[in-house]
Amino acid sequence: MAKARFKVVVSDFHLGKGRYFPDGTQNILEDFIYDREFAEFLDYYRTGAFADAEVEVILNGDILNLLQIDTWGVHTHLITERSTVRAVERIVEGHPEFFEGLKRFAATPGHTISYIVGNHDSGMLWKGARAVFSKACGTEVSFYDVSYRFDGIYVEHGQQYEEFARTDMARPFITRGLPEPVLNLPWGSLFVAVLLPKLKQERPHVDKVRPMNKFLIWTLIHDIVWGIKAGLKIARFIFDTMLFRRRYQIRQGVKSTLGLLKEISVYPNYDKIAFKILDENEDVHTVIFGHTHILKYRQWREGKEYFNEGSWNEVTTLELSEYGTKTRLTYAFIEYPTSAPLNAPSQDPSLNQPVVRLKEWKGVWRPEMDISA
């Protein structure tokens, strides 16, 4: 009898240098505080009914927040392989329980780890960064630059469909006239690396609110002084980067600039993007995205589905249907049929294909947990 097979897909953890600095003070730029819960999640999928199964954890982008890790005390857009390796090392140091959980998982026979690169962790395109991450996991992690496709399922982080976040895979590194190659950051990543950490030091929630256009209106009503100051900083940054190119050499014209600003305030429709992939690929029955931080399921037509596994980060939603601040430890769960081997002859091929469901990790009961320093 064939082994049971499963895959779990998570994304958008945004690990930083750890919840606390060595002196015990809180790191307000740290977005991920569920190390214990994630380690227990991995332990669940390597023991009990899953101990003898084949289980793959797919880390679907933005697992590490490499754009907001300072390089020797400075937040910079000049991200080299050397600085990225150091950043990954510091993240590993700041999240020991997280990586011990991955190491225990990978040490279990039949259990593997895959990593799809997102926009916040585009530094994982460097071979040195991948080597450090694999070493921390105690196994050879399988890395995918953009997407991972298997058994009729298409998994991608999703940043490649946004002009301001898209990585130029034809030229991911800039080498000309530089002592060492640096990441070729899109404008959105440049903003996240240079300006966003300064805004988050004043308002840590600024990047956790959806949708952005409603947050801008809320700020003008309830936090107008800070909103005006932040708006002026953003305007200056836009002029410097897009129009005058004084410091960052981002080659965008005025038309492209206006298009980027529209895209930032009105989020792209990932439902339509997923449906397009499903329509154009007859052999794909399921699309899984991350990136938006919003849990979602849509059926395109019978046998064609789109999932977004959401985020393990706090999200504040201003839409009335989901209003409020929530954290849901959600993921996509993929289960292969055990009654017949995959690709076995059958009158109905769908009986042999894996089934995808969205789940929420409820964790192991604990009487208490820290919520602030």
Image: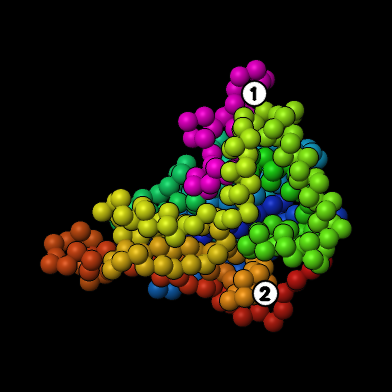
Give the quadrant of residue 124: top right
21 or 209, which is in the foreground? 209
Q: Secondary structure at mark 2?
A: strand
**How many discs appear?**
2
Residue 279 % position (x, y):
31, 55
The quadrant the C terminus occupies is bottom right
As displayed, is residue 241 above or below residue 357? above
**Res. 241 in view:** yes
Residue at image location 58% in from the left, 76% down from the top: 321
**Residue span colored magenta:** 159-186
Residue pointed to by mark 1: 180
Q: Residue 353 vs residue 267: left or right?
A: left
Q: Residue 21 vs residue 61: left or right?
A: right
Coloring applied to the structure: rainbow
Depth check, mark 2 against mark 1: the one in front is 2
Q: Residue 206 vs residue 306: left or right?
A: right
Residue type at the position of mark 2: Gly
Residue at image location 77% in from the left, 62% down from the top: 219
* Residue 368 included in the magenta stretch of the image: no
Give the quadrant of residue 336: bottom left
